[in-house]
Amino acid sequence: MEKLTKKYGLATAICMVVGTVIGSGVFFKAQNVLVATGGNMPLGIAAWAITGLLMIICSLQFATMATKYEKVSGVVDYAEATCGKGYGYYLAWFMVNIYYPGMTSVLAWVSARYLGVLFGWSMVGPEVMALSGFFLIASYTMNALSPKLAGKFQISATIIKLIPITLMAVVGTIVGFINGTLTNNFASVVTEAVGGTASSGLFAAIVATVFAYEGWIVATSINAELKNPKKNLPLALVIGSLIVVAAYILYFIGVAGGAESKVLIDEGAPTAFTNIFGGVGGAILNICIVVSCLGTLNGLMVGATRGMYAIAARNDGPRPETFAQVDKSTNMTTNSSIWGLFVCALWLVYFYGANLTNGWFGVFNFDSSELPIVTIYAMYIPIFIMWMVKEKDMGTFKRFILPVIAIAACLFMVFAAIYAHGITPYLSAKANGAFSFPVLFYLILFAVIMIIGAVFKKSNKKTQE
């Protein structure tokens, strides 16, 4: 049977990390952080740095695993090697049917939404939704027909999205120092922080930045197609994570040099672009956001299109002989890609109905872009625990200290996500004034999808016997 070839180098892997993490969040989370801290700049920088540190810790742990394990699909390989084939299967099933398509579908809409701004389209209008579907199919087509082109696009999009970030970081900081805006913003606080104290404001700011850092794990999905993966994947995870953290913090400082904190709290980062780069700054910002989001969409689609292959390559799941096929001419997992597109389309319909309308699902509406992140970090924890149990040849730091810190980081991420969404029911306008149970419904849907996966796993096992 045809196998995936080693077609990607270190540059592509780094761009997978940087390009998938840096999306629309970097341009707009600055406002959320300033609101949470009451305009306290040092507190805001601390929030970006702390969340970035948590991401780096987890990436370091996976980088250590990457030096030891190499098979088909990065994080799934690590789950299988530490917790067994069963756990690896369920993690892969979750990622291909919930995690990847949930975020991928939202990024298709976000890309269309910001391009629609240039034409004055409503973000919930038919034009934006039609464009969302087009972006989803276009990203799939590029990955399915020419994975090398998709890799080159990832590099190009990453470079393009770093241009406005770099310009704002450098020019905004210089202009802010010259006119005194940056100094004043660092020296003053606009309002009380959320919760009334510095600590509560810091935590609220961290919650605001958590989701801007998500997506780096997608880079592990090209493990089977990466040249010298035991060397290049760890380097990509660490270098890419450091680039993201530096970009976020420097951009945040640059934005503070473009306008007073009170103005940024009220109007957001586009005002800083307009003040520094003139009237066309807003339009340029939107174009850069579109490219940024499309790069993130492409990175997520890379993972979505390879999900079923990661399962089938282990001779598991539904019809492994079908989903394990690799096209001879494109060296792409064609059938796995089709499934990835189908599930992404389903999640796009759900996202539209649950979040952009009056609520098609009544009391059962949830944010499909964020809640799966709670699950993925929770599912990392058993992997790290079993690493400590099994890897007896590792030194004290790699076997115990690093994974313990990574577990703490994961628990914090889970807590932060739950804090942001809440676990108790609340009155929802979309539920016609009734109580809404977003987290409960997500958990029910999660359970149903995992049970379906268990049925396929059991059915395939009987077939093999």
Image (cartoon, rainbow, N blue to C red):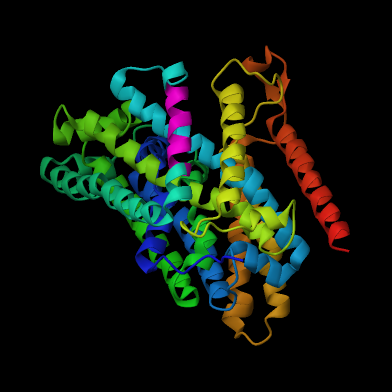
Q: Which quarter shows the C terminus?
A: bottom right
Q: Count up the numbered dots.
A: 0
Does 259 sit left or right of 107 as displayed?
Answer: left
Instruction: Please tell me which residue lies in front, 249 or 179.
Output: 249
In the rendered image of this protein, does residue 101 appear above or below residue 74? above
Question: Residue 270, position in %: x, y?
Answer: 27, 31
Residue 407, picture quadrant: bottom right
For the view shown, which residue lies furthest in the left direction? 178
In the rendered image of this protein, does residue 317 appear above or below residue 121? below
Q: Can you see residue 405?
A: yes
Q: Can you see residue 245?
A: no
Question: Residue 243, position in %: x, y?
Answer: 35, 60
Instruction: Please tell me which residue lies in front, 111 or 213.
Output: 111
Does 284 sit left or right of 230 as displayed?
Answer: left
Residue drawn at x 69%, y 21% as measured from the top left: 361
* Residue 23 falls inside the magenta stretch: no
In the rendered image of this protein, does residue 175 appear above or below residue 16? above
Residue drawn at x 46%, y 60% as measured from the top left: 53
Question: Residue 257, position in %: x, y?
Answer: 21, 42
Instruction: Please tell me which residue lies in front, 346 or 444.
Output: 346
Q: Main secondary structure of the magenta part?
A: helix
Q: Which quarter shows the N terminus?
A: bottom right
The stretch in magenta equals 128-140
Residue drawn at x 73%, y 77% as measured from the top left: 389
Residue 37, picture quadrant: top left
Question: Residue 217, position in %: x, y?
Answer: 53, 57
